[in-house]
C-alpha cells in the first residue's frame, strides 16, 4: 500500500472476553451486527473457508513452545474458520524473532 486511509470508527467497540471453560478456553464476543455483506452461503455450525470476506471477529493464539499459531474467525451467522499456521511457514525457514524488550 502506498497510501494510508484513516476512517473514524463511529460505533461501540467490539468486546472480546476469554475465560476458562470445562474443556478449554471460552471466547465471548459482544459486537454490533452490521449485516454487511449479508450471510455467506455456508451451513451454520460448520467451518467455512473464505469467511474473512464477511463480517467476522478474529483472534490469534500463539503456542510459545512450537511457535505455531491458531487463527480463529467467528461470524454472527454461526459459521467458523480455524486455521493453524507456523511462523516459519509464513516467514520462511530461516526466520527468527528479533530480540526486543517491546513485548516483555
Image (spheres, rainbow, N blue to C red):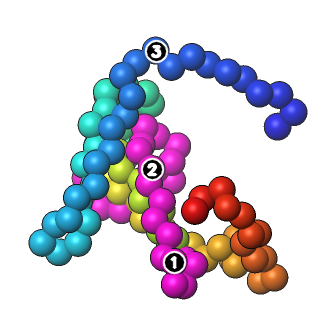
Q: Pointers 2 and 1 in contact (CB under 8 A)? A: no
Query: Can you say which quadrant of the picture contains the C terminus?
Result: bottom right
Residue range of the region highlighted in magenta in the rendering: 41-68
Q: In this view of the protein, which residue sits in the foreground, 101 or 14? A: 101
Query: Reading the chain from its start, which is encountered first: label 3 or label 2?
Result: 3
Q: Pointers 3 and 2 in contact (CB under 8 A)? A: no
What residue lies at 17% left-to-right and 75% top-to-bottom?
23
The prevailing secondary structure element of the residues shown in magenta is: loop
The answer to if 23 sits in the magenta stretch is no
Label 1, on which residue?
64
What residue lies at 33% left-to-right and 38% top-to-bottom?
15
Query: Can you say which quadrant of the picture contains the N terminus?
Result: top right
Assign a secondary structure to mark 2.
strand
> Is 71 positioned to the left or the right of 34 in the image?
right
Pinpoint residue 103: horizontal percent, then vertical percent. Answer: 60, 59
Pinpoint residue 86: horizontal percent, then vertical percent. Answer: 61, 76
> Is 55 positioned to the left or the right of 76 in the image?
right
Label 3, on which residue?
10
**One can see residue 78 in this view:** no
Label 2, on which residue?
58
Q: Residue furthest right?
A: 2
Pinpoint residue 56: horizontal percent, then vertical percent. Answer: 42, 43
Q: Quadrant of residue 85?
A: bottom right
What residue lies at 61% left-to-right and 19% top-to-bottom?
7
Q: Is residue 53 above or below residue 96?
A: above
The answer to if 49 sits in the magenta stretch is yes
**Mark 3, residues whose alpha carbon is within 10 Å: few (<14), some, or many (≥20)?**
few
User: What is the spatial separation of the Cα atoms under label 1 and label 3, in whole angstroms?
Assistant: 36 Å
What residue lies at 33% left-to-right and 44% top-to-bottom?
16
* Image mark count: 3
**Mark 1, residues whose alpha carbon is within 10 Å: few (<14), some, or many (≥20)?**
few
Assign a secondary structure to mark 1.
loop
Amino acid at each position: 500500500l502506498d497510501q494510508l486511509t484513516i476512517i473514524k470508527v463511529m460505533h461501540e467497540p467490539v468486546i472480546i472476553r476469554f475465560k476458562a471453560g470445562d474443556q478449554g478456553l471460552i471466547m465471548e464476543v459482544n459486537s454490533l451486527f452490521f449485516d454487511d455483506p449479508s450471510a455467506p452461503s455456508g451451513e451454520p455450525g460448520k467451518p467455512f473457508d473464505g469467511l474473512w470476506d464477511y463480517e467476522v471477529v478474529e483472534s490469534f493464539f500463539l503456542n510459545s513452545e512450537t511457535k505455531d499459531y491458531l487463527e480463529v474467525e467467528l461470524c454472527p451467522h454461526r459459521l467458523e474458520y480455524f486455521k493453524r499456521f507456523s511462523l516459519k511457514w509464513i516467514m520462511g525457514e530461516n526466520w527468527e524473532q528479533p530480540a526486543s524488550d517491546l513485548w516483555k
